[in-house]
Image: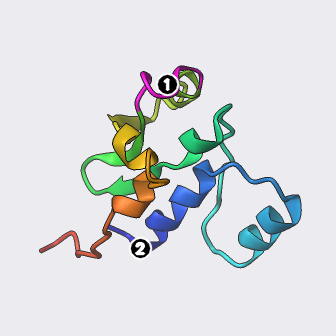
Amino acid sequence: MDPSAVLGAVSAMKVKNEESEMIMQQMSDHRYDKLTVPDDMAANCIYLNIPNKGHVLLHPTPEEYPESAKVYEKLKDHLLIPVSNSEMEKVDGLLTCSSIFINKKADC
């Protein structure tokens, strides 16, 4: 997994401050696409660029956020994996809070 791909997770977050978005673009060599979903909590997702799988997006389930799921479904070039997070949300936990990223070379 390319460590810069993990930064792609930020692209799905709802950016409320245009200045923050501009700074993020300037400080990175990665190009970000902004994806806006109607539910703030549904914006917490994980983007992965996995060799032989391509673009993968872990996102909240349609049962949790049906309107936001419709936005994710428009990402035809991504492997979409809905992940239930309703129990973690009860204690203000988000999908990214329960994730560990390990940088492993593709040839291993």
Going by the picture, which residue comes out furthest to the front?
91
Residue pictured at 58% horizontal, 28% vertical = 68
Residue pictured at 41% horizontal, 62% vertical = 97
The part of the chain drawn in magenta is: 61-67
Q: Give 22 or 106, whichever is nearer the viewer.
A: 22
Q: Main secondary structure of the magenta part?
A: loop
If the image is split into quadrants, where does the C terminus sit?
Answer: bottom left
Residue at label 2? 3
Mark positioned earlier in the residue sequence (2 or 1): 2
**Within-10-Å neighbours for mark 1: few <14, some 14–19, many 20+:** few
Q: Which colour style is shown?
A: rainbow
**Within-10-Å neighbours for mark 2: few <14, some 14–19, many 20+:** few
Q: Give 60 or 80, whichever is nearer the viewer.
A: 60
User: Residue 98 magenta-drawn?
Assistant: no
Separation of marks 2 and 1 at Cα, in angstroms: 25 Å
- Kind of residue at disc 2: Pro
Q: Give 78 or 52, whichever is nearer the viewer.
A: 78
Vertical comparison of 94 with 77: above or below: below
Q: Is residue 88 left or right of residue 73?
A: left
Q: Give 70 or 42, whichever is nearer the viewer.
A: 42
Vertical comparison of 17 with 79: above or below: below
Element under disc 1: loop
User: Residue 64 magenta-drawn?
Assistant: yes
Residue at label 1? 73
